[in-house]
Image (tube, helix red, strand yellow):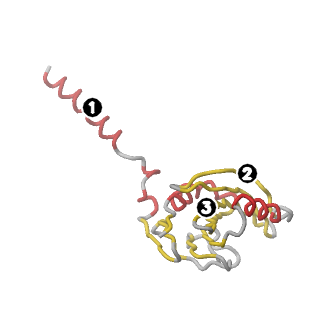
Amino acid sequence: MKKYILGIIVIIAVIFVSGCITDSDENTDDFNGTKTLSQNGISITYPGNWVVAEAHSENSIIAVADPNSKDTNDLGSINVNIERKNLSTPLNSFFTQTYKKLFSNSDYQLISQGNTSIGEFTALECLYLTNDNGNIKKHRAIWIENNKEVYVILCTAPQNEFSNQEKIFDFIVSSFRTV
């Protein structure tokens, strides 16, 4: 009888312990550790196997990329770029005007727009596709207003790889902080 009770206790302990261990999909070890980058008044955390990238937008203040994802211009095709702009009009108006102009070009296709939140910030979000000579990329742009400035966090990947990168993008976006 004691062996029977001991066996049940062992089984219950194994079930309990396995329920307390997190799934590796939620573990930052999947990212080969993490790194934190703080500059230009913001801070983000990103996967340890990613690198700080050179951004090609005049308003970019931080960019990180997967170094294994080079496009035809030798740039990281999977990346997160953060821009900062002064806000002279209400955020909703600036957001609407920007995308109205952008989507007047047939190389840009709207998927969705809406409200979201990132930590303590309420934000606007736009999901869209770009077509650069048949190279289709998917973008997630998150607009955050803070102290009369707007931060735009742009997550980019080839369309066929975007869903595989969403966990990483969400991790980086959720780490966004002003310092």
Instruction: Identify the residue at image location x=28%, y=36%.
Output: 14
- Residue ID for mark 2: 112
- Residue ID for mark 1: 11
Note whether 14 is above or below 31 in the view shown.
above
> Does residue 38 appear to the left or right of 162 in the view shown?
left
The N terminus - image quarter = top left
User: In the image, what residue type sits under mark 3?
Assistant: Ile
User: In the image, what residue type sits under mark 1?
Assistant: Ile
User: In the image, what residue type sits under mark 2?
Assistant: Ser
Between disc 1 and disc 3, the foreground one is 3
Mark 3 → mark 2, Cα distance in angstroms: 17 Å
Mark 1 → mark 3, Cα distance in angstroms: 49 Å
Mark number displayed over residue 144: 3
Q: Residues within 10 Å of mark 3 (few under 14, many from 20)?
A: many
> Does residue 140 appear to the left or right of 39 in the view shown?
right
Q: Relative to the observer, which residue lies in front, 178 or 102?
A: 178
> Does residue 121 appear to the left or right of 85 in the view shown?
left
Label 3 SS: strand
